[in-house]
Image: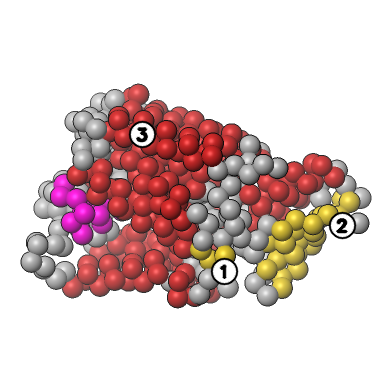
């Protein structure tokens, strides 16, 4: 069961913090983050990779769905 | 689209370009240790429009215009122009207002603090320490739930308002019409009279706007991300700026180490520290340094644009009311307004927290 975060409309550093808190809380599994800024996409991707999570980014209509996974 | 600019190497190169370019701009006519300063240059714009009458700091700085329009172009080309607004605009205006108060008590935004350091101005160390203290305070609020809320998508025309204002300023600068009041005002002596040729200033600002939009260059974010998430990406940019400016200053004979007699600076260290602490806290609560607020405005962020307008209005206020410092020292009302600003920002931090 994937966890979901809606980071749309939030400015720095809120999207990264939400993602980080969820990653720390879950430890592993799948987290889906919906973001609407390229800065949030880049920042969350960088943090997730740094923390050992896999990142997949899907762009859809001016929004980004980031899927973070760690087995 | 993957952002190839989002690597440490790329942002370090961006910083090198900004820093060495700024030092070169000083050689080409900009004031010493002020090759580019968002706070000072917005203050000069405020003066040129007559919002204050400090005769030595009035000029429609093309760099500011270029920064916004460069970011706009980069955002349009890379499909990152996203018109948005509505995240506590009045709060952002006040944060911009007190950010400028703090910056004018110290005499510079974080960019200029780095350029001052790169030129050998030891007072900048105190200012940067204050900046870090202010940002650290802001992080405590962020960690305890401080949040100005979500923005909303808005009309493209709404996102274009600040860029259009910048085009208007550029037209005024080129035509230089004289109004009955005497406006526009251009300094005949002092820092406002010192500037590189218009086309070069505009081009430099424009190029910096493009690379900073692509790399998300932000001096406040650099310190914040180290403390908050142990991320050194933005810090690589600031390190590049410092290094680029320092090397270029040495090569051009512009490096003069010391504390006393530094250009457009004073030695009142408590207020150097507290001025920048206020500014740092305001930047942290607003989510970006003054430069970043200009780039976000170019991307269509109306809330960042309100922060910018708060800074410009504040500059007029700060000079009219004796709040801004000068090389002779702090203004008579500078300390009081720094304290008022700190109280205001702490109130914003304490009262605008969402419970988890």
Residue at image position (30%, 30%) is B336
Magenta-span inclusion, residue B50:
yes
* Secondary structure found at label 1: strand
Q: Quadrant of the N terminus of chain B?
A: bottom right
Report the magenta residues as a range.
B42-54
Residue at image position (36%, 64%) is B66
Earlier in the chain: of badge 1 and badge 3, it is 1
- Vertical position of residue B270 compared to residue B6: above or below: above
Q: Quadrant of the C terminus of chain B?
A: top right
* Residue B195 on image: x %, y %: 23, 55
Does any portion of residue B259 appear in the rendered image? no
Report in which chain the residue with disc 2 lies.
Answer: A
Circles 1 and 2: CB atoms closer than 8 Å: no
* Secondary structure found at label 2: loop
In this rendering, the label closer to the viewer, 3 or 2: 3
CA distance separating discs 1 and 3: 34 Å
Is disc 1 surrounded by few (<14), some (14 to 19) or many (20+) residues within 10 Å? some
> In front here: B334 or B5?
B334
In this rendering, the label closer to the viewer, 1 or 2: 1
* Residue A54 on image: x %, y %: 82, 54
User: Hey, which quadrant is residue A55 in on the image?
Assistant: bottom right
Which residue bears the numbered disc 3? B340
Q: Which mark is residue A2?
A: 2
Is disc 3 surrounded by few (<14), some (14 to 19) or many (20+) residues within 10 Å? some
> In front here: B240 or B72?
B72
Which residue bears the numbered disc 1? B153
CA distance separating discs 3 and 2: 47 Å
């Amino acid at each position: 069961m994937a966890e979901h975060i809606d980071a749309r409309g939030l400015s720095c550093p809120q999207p990264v913090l939400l993602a980080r808190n969820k990653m720390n809380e879950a430890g592993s599994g799948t987290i889906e983050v919906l973001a609407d800024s390229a800065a949030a996409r880049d920042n969350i991707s960088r943090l997730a990779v740094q923390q050992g999570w896999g990142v997949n980014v899907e762009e859809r209509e001016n929004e980004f769905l980031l899927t973070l996974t760690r087995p | 689209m993957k952002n190839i600019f989002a690597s440490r190497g790329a942002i370090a190169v961006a910083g090198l370009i900004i820093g060495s370019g700024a030092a070169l701009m000083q050689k080409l006519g900009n004031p010493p240790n002020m090759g580019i300063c968002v706070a000072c240059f917005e203050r000069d714009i405020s003066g040129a429009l007559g919002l204050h009458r400090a005769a030595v700091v009035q000029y429609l700085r093309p760099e500011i215009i270029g920064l916004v329009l460069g970011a706009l172009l980069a955002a349009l080309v890379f499909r990152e122009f996203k018109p948005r607004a509505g995240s506590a605009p009045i709060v952002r205006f006040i944060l911009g207002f007190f950010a400028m108060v703090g910056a004018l008590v110290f005499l510079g935004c974080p960019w200029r603090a780095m350029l001052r350091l790169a030129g050998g101005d030891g007072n900048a160390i105190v200012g940067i320490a204050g900046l870090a203290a202010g940002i650290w305070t802001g992080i405590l609020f962020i960690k305890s739930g401080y949040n100005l809320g979500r923005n909303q998508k808005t009309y493209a025309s709404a996102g274009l308002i600040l860029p259009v204002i910048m085009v208007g300023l550029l037209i005024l600068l080129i035509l230089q019409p004289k109004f009955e009041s005497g406006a526009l005002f251009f300094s005949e002596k002092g820092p406002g009279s010192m500037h590189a040729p218009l086309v070069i200033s505009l081009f430099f600002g424009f190029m910096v706007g493009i690379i900073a939009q692509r790399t998300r260059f932000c001096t406040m974010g650099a310190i914040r991300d180290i403390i908050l998430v142990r991320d050194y990406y933005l810090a690589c940019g600031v390190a590049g700026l410092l290094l680029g400016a320092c090397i270029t200053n040495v090569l051009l004979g512009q490096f003069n180490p010391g504390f006393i007699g530094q250009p457009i600076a004073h030695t009142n260290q408590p207020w150097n520290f507290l001025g920048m602490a206020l500014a740092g806290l305001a930047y942290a609560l607003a989510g970006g340094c003054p430069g970043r607020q200009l780039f976000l405005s170019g991307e269509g962020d109306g809330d960042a644009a309100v922060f910018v307008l708060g800074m410009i209005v504040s500059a007029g206020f700060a000079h009219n009311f004796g709040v801004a410092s000068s090389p002779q020292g702090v203004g008579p009302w500078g300390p009081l307004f720094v304290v008022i600003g700190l109280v205001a920002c702490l109130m914003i931090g304490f009262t605008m927290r969402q419970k988890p």
